[in-house]
């Protein structure tokens, strides 16, 4: 036996460890052609000359990834336990707050799972080891997000309606076709388009708007578990944002022919993502009993300031322009949440959440956040809805709405400059007429009509008899709705329970 | 090593809790003209040009070893680009 | 522009008229009244007289408590952006209402 005489190796620097454990584990194939191993990275037209130029600024290795993710989960589960033990659901601001979480649970974990699957695909099929490893980490993150979201909200499922069949609902219910079709659209694109769609346009440009003010709102409304999983997930998002940014810069630096392809994807996916998070606008401004900031403020802070005045100035260097329909989004910031919540209010009889007319306190807040537009909306629609309630009724739309072929949201968005007239756009393709809510959605259709003629539009499917039957009660059963899930909040099962829980605590106290 | 940064704001949103207080203090000490905004659960730090997080400053305030990877546990979001992420420091800036 | 894809990419519309037999989808839109947040979608027989559609509107849109149903006797109908004077006894089809047409009015 020989005694080793050399000194133990010096500890590697972060940069060396990253290189050794990601890039250096790769090899060049010898007996199989590269395009046979990686068959999906050429058809989209993106030209890549040197995959080794892809670097992960986080310099993550498997070891570091596991270590920090485990720590994040430990912290989250400690909070969940404490919340459940202390009957934390009783300390929410109000029972109606939970409606925002119902929409979150019904819409988001399935999307996270879709993201998991597609990043897993990238982790297998990208040619470069740096891109593959970053995608692998994101794939595992997305699975973690789906699991922690479901696990966190499962506590509330014991006490509130609307959360029992979230996965069936995410497949079937009309408003949940909005996120579902979004991820189906991205997942059926090629790997580079997926990366621009989800990694860049959604994660970098837009998810701050979904997570940051919303989770801060959870903190403000006594919802400790949601705040904790939100921030835990969002700490992964920072890596995802980086992957998206790295991805777009990599494509732009590899070949100048990539610029027009990337720009068109960016134009498309900004608008797709922006329309998707319109639901968040309605939730933020109308469904949180206590608000941190308005949709308009969040949009100005997290989109206009950070992205338009920060990121896009940076991307100008490569010839990238701000997204094609960005001005429309800016113009809508004063009215978006009013319109979305008005959709949710009048169709909540067919939904797995409840809604109610903003109370006096809500209205005072809306007036201060939207001094120009709230008074108009109030006088045109809410005063009338209030009169219906005062006479013992509740306004629900008696029909099924016209849906946008692309975003699948009921066509309640209005013409720029005229908040009282809905925007109607149409294209004829192969003799058939298709409807759109905006120039943005119409532009997306006209670019790839073959893709979007296949859209599974909930209203059309109901009329074809594919959703359980011809009447609303038939459809509600097929959706998985149970008594107490839908309709008006005041007087609902959730509302009655909430009053009962708090009345008894006063008596006992 | 200095980083050439474009003169536009960059920033980072951190969880506001005991763990990150030392990090926030370290960033405040090492970055002049930092803007700090508090929201429920969040502290938002923004600065013109570049924002630096030094391992030594954080360790000095935490009183224990701290790997720069640990910054991921504190971070909720950021804007700018990680132009440097090494053992001893993290730098956020716009490259162009 | 064709979809960039790994193979031929051609699929039928999921909402083509033939899926509705002798019926078709029709959108009714009260333009300028956001109380109905979006136009409404109906499945109507192509052969349904336009007059039946007018009668249906009187009931349907009375979900707005301010509606005076007699207003429908004098509204200006617009079918797919063209102002028309419909023949109430003739079918939707004969009046130019096609699959997914937009039938609008203002009051």
Image (tube, rainbow, N blue to C red):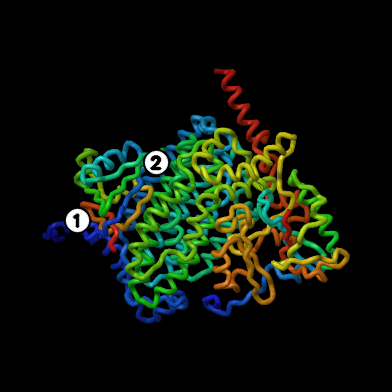
Graded by Cα atoms within 10 Å as few (under 14), some (14 to 19) or many (20 or more), the crowding at tag 1 reads few
Task: Determine the residue located farthest toward the left in the rendered image.
Answer: A5
Which residue is rendered at x = 63% and y = 39% of the image? A356
| Res. A134 image quadrant | bottom left
Which mark, by number, is residue A75? 2
Q: What percent of the width, then of the height, locates residue C106?
A: 72, 56
Chain where mark 2 sits: A
Q: Is residue C41 visible?
A: yes
Mark 2 vs mark 1, foreground winner is 2
Q: Chain of mark 1?
A: A
SS for callout 1: loop
Residue at left offset 47%, top offset 64%: A197
Tell me residue A154's x, y (percent).
55, 42
Q: Is residue A30 above or below residue A407?
A: below
Which quadrant does the N terminus of chain A fall into?
bottom left
Residue A11 tag number: 1
Give the alpha-carbon distance from disc 2 to disc 1, as whole Å: 29 Å
- Labels 2 and 1 within one chain: yes
Q: Nearer the viewer, residue B1 or C45?
A: C45
């Amino acid at each position: 036996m020989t005694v080793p005489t050399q000194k133990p190796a010096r500890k590697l620097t972060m940069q060396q460890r990253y290189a050794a454990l990601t890039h250096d584990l790769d090899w060049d194939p010898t007996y199989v052609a590269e395009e046979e191993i990686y068959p999906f990275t050429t058809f989209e037209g993106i030209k890549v000359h040197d995959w080794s130029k892809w670097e992960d600024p986080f310099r993550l290795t498997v070891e570091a990834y596991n270590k920090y993710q485990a720590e994040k989960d430990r912290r989250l589960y400690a909070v969940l336990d404490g919340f459940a033990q202390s009957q934390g659901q009783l300390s929410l601001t109000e029972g109606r707050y939970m409606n925002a979480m119902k929409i979150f649970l019904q819409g988001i974990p399935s999307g996270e799972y879709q993201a998991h699957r597609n990043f897993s695909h990238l982790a297998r099929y990208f040619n470069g080891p740096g891109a593959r490893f970053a995608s692998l980490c994101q794939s595992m993150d997305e699975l973690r997000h789906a699991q922690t979201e479901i696990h966190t909200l499962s506590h509330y499922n014991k006490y509130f309606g609307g959360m029992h069949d979230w996965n069936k609902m995410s497949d079937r219910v009309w408003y949940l076709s909005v996120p579902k079709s979004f991820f189906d659209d991205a997942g059926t694109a090629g790997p580079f388009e997926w990366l621009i769609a989800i990694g860049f346009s959604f994660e970098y440009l837009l998810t701050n708007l979904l997570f940051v003010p919303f989770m801060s709102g959870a903190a403000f409304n006594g919802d400790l578990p949601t705040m904790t999983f939100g921030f835990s997930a969002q700490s992964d998002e920072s890596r995802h944002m980086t992957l998206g940014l790295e991805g777009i810069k990599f494509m732009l630096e590899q070949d100048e022919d990539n610029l027009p392809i990337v720009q068109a994807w960016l134009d498309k996916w900004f608008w797709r993502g922006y329309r998707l998070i319109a639901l968040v606008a309605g939730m933020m401004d109308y469904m949180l009993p206590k608000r941190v900031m308005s949709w308009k403020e969040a949009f100005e802070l997290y989109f206009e300031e950070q992205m338009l005045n920060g990121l896009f100035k940076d991307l100008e260097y490569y010839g990238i322009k701000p997204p094609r329909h960005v001005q429309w989004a800016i113009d809508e910031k004063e009215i978006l949440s009013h319109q979305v919540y008005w959709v949710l209010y009048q169709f909540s009889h067919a939904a797995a959440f409840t809604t109610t007319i903003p109370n006096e306190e809500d209205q005072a807040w809306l007036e201060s956040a939207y001094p120009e537009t709230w008074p108009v909306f109030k006088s045109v629609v809410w005063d009338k809805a209030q009169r219906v309630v005062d006479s013992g009724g509740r306004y629900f739309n008696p029909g099924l709405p016209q849906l946008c072929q692309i975003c699948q949201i009921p066509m309640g968005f209005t013409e720029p400059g005229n908040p009282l007239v809905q925007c109607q756009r149409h294209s004829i393709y192969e003799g058939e007429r298709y409807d759109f809510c905006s120039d943005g959605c119409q532009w997306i259709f006209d670019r790839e009509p073959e893709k979007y003629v296949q859209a599974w539009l909930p209203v059309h499917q109901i009329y074809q008899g594919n959703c359980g039957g011809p009447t609303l009660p038939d459809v509600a059963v097929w959706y998985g709705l149970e008594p107490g899930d839908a309709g008006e909040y005041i007087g609902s099962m959730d509302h009655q329970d909430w009053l009962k829980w708090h009345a008894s605590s006063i008596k006992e106290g | 090593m200095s980083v050439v940064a474009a003169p536009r704001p960059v920033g980072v949103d951190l969880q506001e809790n005991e763990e990150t207080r030392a990090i926030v203090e370290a960033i405040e000490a090492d970055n002049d003209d930092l803007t700090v905004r508090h929201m429920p659960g969040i502290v938002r730090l923004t600065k013109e040009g570049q924002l630096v997080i030094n391992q030594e400053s954080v360790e000095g305030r935490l009183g224990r070893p701290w790997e720069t990877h640990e910054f991921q546990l504190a971070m909720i979001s950021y804007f700018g680009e990680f132009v440097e992420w090494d053992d001893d420091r993290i730098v956020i800036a716009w490259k162009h | 522009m064709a979809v960039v894809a790994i193979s031929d990419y051609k699929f039928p519309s999921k909402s083509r008229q033939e899926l509705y037999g002798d019926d078709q989808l029709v959108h009714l839109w009260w333009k300028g009244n956001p109380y109905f947040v979006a136009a409404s979608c109906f499945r109507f027989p192509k052969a349904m007289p336009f007059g039946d559609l007018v009668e249906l509107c009187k009931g349907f849109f009375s979900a707005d408590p301010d509606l005076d149903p007699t207003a429908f006797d004098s509204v200006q109908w617009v079918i797919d952006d063209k102002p028309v004077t419909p023949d109430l006894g003739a079918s939707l089809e004969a009046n130019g209402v096609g699959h997914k047409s937009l039938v609008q009015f203002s009051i």
